[in-house]
Image (cartoon, rainbow, N blue to C red):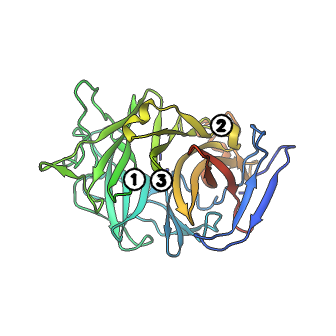
């Protein structure tokens, strides 16, 4: 679920730290943290932001730099001149709740600019779906750092069982499918294709979990229609494991889906990817690990988002850090058997990491290097 310090390095491995010159989000200074390619048990890179913590980050490029939104009350927000920061807390993003929402604890918001307006897609609690039940709404603002106001009093995505007005996408199951979703919809993520069409990806709660995609109107505020009725969403993937946080990108003639798998509360949470010629073929495509603890040293690297900055592909994701000792002001990646509920005395928090991705000749993504905090 996207409920979106200084690192102590204990290793004898050789670390390569390089800095290249530049100074803005589009041509910015890239201080990088790299480990030898053969080292599979990697030491963790330093997070680029510990305060504010940013869980399930969504990052967008603006004229002034970068803006991030994350999981939390009223949608926490932060800004920075570039991936390495410094990241500065900004006022929360959501100005008010839609009438159908029952509280301000928002999961995994997604911020995008469409048709010269800024849109905030969010999953808010709703009655009728159980304790964790949520539905997806959309809010609008003239500025990425302004107050976002929900549009209309109707969810964008919400199952019919919810005690809310009927949504534009009520995720009616296909014939023969089990009744999905039983606990709501979360993890909104917008994908725009080369033709200017917008799509919303999201996760349905419960097991098996599904990742779905529904076409939006040109302005991104409603589900597009066919013969007067909203178009139904399409199932992209289904799994008895926990899968969530879908982010779709286009690479030449293929689609690459990044997503999280596992329990976000522990270090086994990870980021995977699949690639296919069409989104509907992603379910049968091989899955590959991009970020996990053994490769990165980060505890639970997930909730990832992709941003294009200056022609390069940047990935932002969260991971768990814990205090190094009672009363310590320092944090390090939590131990391998960490679980947030069992180890609450370690003051765990999800913090922001950033990595530069590159693409092989066959369009396979790989981590080129990790960013380090500005001035680090």
Q: Quadrant of residue 41?
A: top right
* Residue 4 x/y as whole percent: 49, 50
Q: How many labels sit on residues?
A: 3
Instruction: Say which residue appears at 41% left-offset and 53% top-offset.
Output: 106
Instruction: Report if the CB atoms under discs 1 and 2 are less than 8 Å apart.
Output: no
Q: Between residue 69 and residue 124, name the one nearer to us.
A: 69
Res 71 label: 3
| Residue 74 visible in the displayed image | no
Name the residue carrying label 1. 191
Of helix, strand and loop, which one carries label 2?
A: loop
Q: Residues within 10 Å of mark 1 (few under 14, many from 20)?
A: some
Of helix, strand and loop, which one carries label 1?
A: strand
Instruction: Say which residue appears at 52% left-offset and 36% top-offset.
Output: 261
Q: Residues within 10 Å of mark 3 (few under 14, many from 20)?
A: many
Res 338 label: 2
* Residue 324 x/y as whole percent: 75, 48
């Amino acid at each position: 679920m996207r409920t979106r310090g200084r690192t102590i390095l204990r290793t004898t491995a050789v670390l390569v730290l390089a800095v290249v010159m530049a100074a803005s989000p589009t041509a910015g200074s890239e201080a990088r943290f790299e480990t030898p390619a053969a080292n599979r048990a990697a030491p963790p890179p330093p997070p680029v932001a510990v305060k504010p913590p940013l869980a399930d980050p969504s990052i967008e490029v603006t004229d002034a730099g970068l803006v991030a939104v994350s999981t939390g009350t009223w949608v926490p927000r932060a800004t920075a001149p570039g991936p390495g920061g410094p990241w500065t807390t900004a006022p929360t993003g959501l100005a008010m709740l839609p009438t159908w929402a029952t509280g301000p604890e928002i999961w995994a918001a997604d911020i995008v600019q469409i048709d010269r307006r800024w849109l905030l897609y969010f999953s808010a609690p709703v009655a009728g779906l159980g304790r964790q039940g949520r539905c997806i709404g959309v809010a609008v603002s003239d500025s990425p750092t302004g107050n976002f106001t929900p549009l209309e009093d109707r969810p964008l995505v919400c199952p019919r069982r919810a005690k809310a007005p009927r949504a534009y996408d009520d995720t009616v199951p296909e014939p023969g499918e089990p009744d999905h979703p039983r606990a709501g919809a979360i993890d909104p993520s917008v994908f725009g294709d080369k033709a200017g069409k917008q799509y919303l990806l999201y996760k349905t709660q419960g097991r098996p979990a599904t990742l779905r995609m529904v076409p939006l109107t040109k302005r991104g505020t409603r589900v597009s229609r066919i013969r007067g009725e909203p178009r139904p969403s399409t199932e992209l993937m289904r799994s008895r494991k926990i899968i969530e946080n879908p982010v779709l990108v286009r690479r030449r003639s293929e689609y690459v889906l990044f997503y999280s798998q596992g329990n976000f509360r522990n270090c086994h949470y990870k980021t995977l990817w699949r690639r296919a010629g069409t989104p509907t073929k992603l379910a049968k495509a091989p899955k590959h690990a991009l970020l996990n603890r053994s490769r990165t040293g980060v505890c639970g690297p997930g909730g990832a988002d992709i941003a294009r900055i200056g022609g390069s592909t940047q990935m932002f994701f969260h991971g768990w850090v814990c205090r190094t000792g009672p009363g310590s002001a320092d944090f390090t990646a939590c131990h391998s058997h960490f679980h947030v509920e069992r180890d609450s005395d370690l003051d765990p928090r999800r913090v922001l990491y950033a990595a530069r991705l590159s693409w092989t000749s066959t369009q396979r993504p790989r981590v080129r290097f990790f960013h380090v905090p500005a001035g680090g």
